[in-house]
Amino acid sequence: MPFTIALSGLNAASADLGVTANNVANVNTNGFKMSRAQFAEVFAVGTQSVSSSASGSGVRLSSIAQQFTQGNIDFTDNALDLAIGGEGFFVLNDNGARSYSRAGAFGVDNQGYVVNAQGARLQTYPYAGGGLFNTGTPVDLQLTTGANPPAATTRSSFGINLPANAAVPTNPVFDPLDPTSFNHTTSVTVYDSLGAAHTATVYFIKDAAANTWNTEVEIAGNPVGGTTQITFANDGSLQTPVGGLMPLNPYNPGTGAADIAMSLDFGTATQFGSNFGVNSLSQDGFTTGRLTGVSVDAEGIVFARFTNGQSTSLGKLALANFVNPQGLQQIGDTNWGESFQSGDALLGEAGTASFGNIQSGALEASNVDLTAQLVQMITAQRNFQANAQMISTADTVTQTVINIR
């Protein structure tokens, strides 16, 4: 009997060493979750024959429990390195089979899909427009490989100040080549429907009437607005045009593009006693853009960014959680599959309910505490040695009994 009990102890210590060795081996594996060997004592008697003098019959390995504590976050320079701060798993499509992982080292395959090292595709909720996402069924995340189409300018905003003490120009006939025929000028680049750039220039001319200015507008040297007045109230705020918008005549760029039909927005223009100044200048058009990279925000929204300064939402990362994560089935490569013990996957979005936030340009390190594992290794080794000694002692006792005459 002592021999079999000690043998069960040897098996338990060996299993403990195996679990510890696996933890130590994966101390640098991103997204790895350490395991812990759990044991239970063995009794040879049943529940109907409990005796106060009954002794145990050894030990058995009851389970190997995964420990899903948070690993440290290590920062990288790759936008597709993703870490989950909190609960949840990345959802992956592995040739039609769904798997789950905390290892967020992703790249792009030759078809533009975002994949892990094994080729499993990262799952996202597709963009539905208007800042909304279709949170029904996740789909494979595929990066946009084409160009971002251009958009023609429809509005240009001028945050300017015109000096209240300006004098009327000496030349009453406007001539863009004669600086004595206007007071101030500023320019902005605008775009046609094909993405070609054109320079729009606005000339400001002080009128003899109080608080009144005239404007002349040219695009690529061609007049597009005629003389239009801007008036201000006594406090320096804009009075007309009402609402600040000044429509221009359509301009034919001559490039095969549609006419540029745009308005100037002087809603924030002022007339104060200070010098002429351009505080802000913007317009809503842009040229064709090429993909320069991607970014992922804390809520898991994936953006494609282009050379024209624009960005497009490609989707929102789908995360999964489980009632019992320790019941997940390990399938290798730091991936898990759902099982009866884990329950069905509960899908959701980062930053909501029981799901953590996404950190782009970072990876979650292994949650193995190397110091603690080395201590556990020594403990398991001593347990193994003690049980081996128990077997040796039991063998000696047996030999003594055999040698009794």
Image: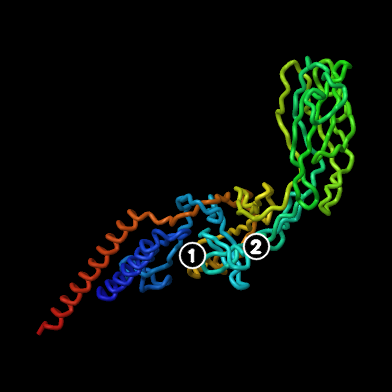
The residue labelled by disc 1 is 334
Q: Amino acid at mark 1?
A: Thr
Bin the neighbour count of mark 1 within 10 Å (Cα to Cα): few under 14, some 14-19, many 20 and up.
Answer: some
**Closest to the observer, 203 or 212:** 203
**Closest to the observer, 130 or 198:** 198
Classify residue 26 as left or right of residue 77: left
Residue found at x 79% / y 22%: 180
Q: Amino acid at mark 2?
A: Gln
**Closest to the observer, 271 or 302:** 271
Residue found at x 80% / y 32%: 202
For the residue labelled by badge 2, is the local secondary structure a helix, a strand or a loop? loop
Q: Quadrant of the N terminus?
A: bottom left
Question: Given this view, does label 2 or label 1 mark the residue nearer the observer?
Answer: 2
Q: Position of residue 19 (x, y in %)?
A: 37, 65
For the residue labelled by badge 1, is the local secondary structure a helix, a strand or a loop? loop
* Mark carried by residue 142: 2
**Closest to the observer, 296 or 45:** 296
Classify residue 247 as left or right of residue 391: right
Q: Position of residue 359 (x, y in %)?
A: 55, 50
Q: Is residue 56 above or below residue 33?
A: below
Q: Quadrant of the C terminus?
A: bottom left
Q: Let me know if residue 57 appears in the view.
A: no
Classify residue 74 as left or right of residue 131: left
Q: Name which of mark 2 and mark 1 comes first in the sequence.
A: 2
Q: Is residue 339 above or below residue 263?
A: below
Q: Position of residue 10 (x, y in %)?
A: 29, 71
